[in-house]
Amino acid sequence: MSLPIDLSMRLTTAFYEGLAKPQRFAEGLRLMAESLDCELAVFGIWDRRGLWAAWRQARKAGGNAWQYLIEDNRLPSNEFRAQVRKLPASRWMRSDPLELPMSIGRLTDTSQHALCHRLATGRAEAVLCLYRRDDGMPGPSLLLAADDMLATLLPGLEPLAKLHQLAQGSRHLTHLLGCIRMPVMLVDVSGRILASNTSARALVEQARKANGSKAGITLPGLSAEQFAAIVRRACRPGDKGGGSLMQVSPGTTHPPLQVMVTPVAANPAAGSQQPAALILVHGPQGGDSGSHLLQQIFGLTPAEARLTRLILDGRSPGDAASQLHVSVATVRTQLSAVLKKTGAQRQSDLVRRLSPLLVLDSSHPLH
């Protein structure tokens, strides 16, 4: 028994469209369930590290009506994954739902029987379960038709896995950039912002307002054309210059900004086909400039944190005393306490140890 060509085309279309429209993916499950005389089809896919999962379900609700369930990022239990891995690979297996409890909710109708198939693609694994009224293994012709159908559906499995891997990577990158105090963003060669933190978005919005809401992404003090040229130069194929550092003046009423542009190579394995540029902006950040973070991590007093911040900025104890309006003796006493709390041996060691922390956002939750 072979699969009708028109049904194969409908299934392929439904599953590929399901990458962008999850309900169409579930409609593909419905087509499969109906052709195999099943009342419920459940498709689950998750990565082997347990970072993401995607579930699609199509359930017959009576007559010709079907209900769909679309749920992402709900991980199956370790027990469930272990049971799935015990299923023979690349062939159908009759399995009682009580022996293979679905994390989507155990069936209350014990008259339905599961027909399962374990799948794998790259770093992801998946299971397809079809629930039928008929107990026992389907005949060879029906299983052959099911295998033909799976061969039609499998090309849509890997893109779905990659889509979720990229989405998970994007969430990690956004969180990472959010921990950084200075404005930082990742921009591709077309000028599209792939990821950015709050400070960078504020700078882009400031530049947009200064330019009269004109189209184009840029930074204060740069036109959209200049910014695009900088990004294109950083993304130039074969450019091994290691980036560039420039000073940009937003205007006479604002201090200059130091803009560092670093090329980031394309990574086809991660789904990135084009190079991008990592852009960091150093300038007046406002607020406590990291003093609160130093208090959080090392238990410094506010006065010790303010002094430490000035030392990390390259000020001498005499300069710090003048700016803080205290005596040099007071500064040296506070500096001695700071060295003890941070574990630094001397002032140069303090700068070496603590300078990397200045890029962190003190308002970001610390774990």
Image (spheres, rainbow, N blue to C red):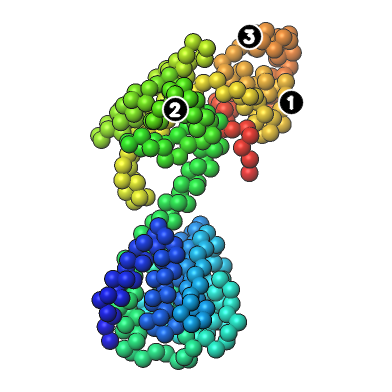
Given residues 297 and 185, the one toward you in this image is: 185
Q: Quadrant of the C terminus?
A: top right
- Residue 48 appears in the picture as rendered: no
Which residue is rendered at x = 59% and y = 33% of the image?
361
Which residue is rendered at x = 49% and y = 70% of the image?
68
Q: Which residue is mark 3?
A: 319
Neighbour tally class for label 1: few under 14, some 14-19, many 20 plus, Cα within 10 Å: some
Q: Which residue is mark 1?
A: 301
Which of label 1 and label 2 is nearer to you? 2
> Horizontal and vertical percent for residue 3?
28, 80
Q: Quadrant of residue 326?
A: top right
Mark 3, secondary structure of its residue: helix
> Horizontal and vertical percent for residue 228?
34, 29
Picture disc at residue 213: 2
Q: Check disc 2 and give the amino acid type.
A: Ser
Neighbour tally class for label 2: few under 14, some 14-19, many 20 plus, Cα within 10 Å: few
Point out the tag, 2 or 3, that comes first from the N-terminus.
2
Given residues 114 and 89, the one toward you in this image is: 114
Mark 1 to mark 3 CA distance (whole Å): 20 Å
Q: Quadrant of residue 108?
A: bottom right
> Horizontal and vertical percent for residue 72?
51, 60
Which residue is rendered at x = 39% and y = 89% of the image?
138
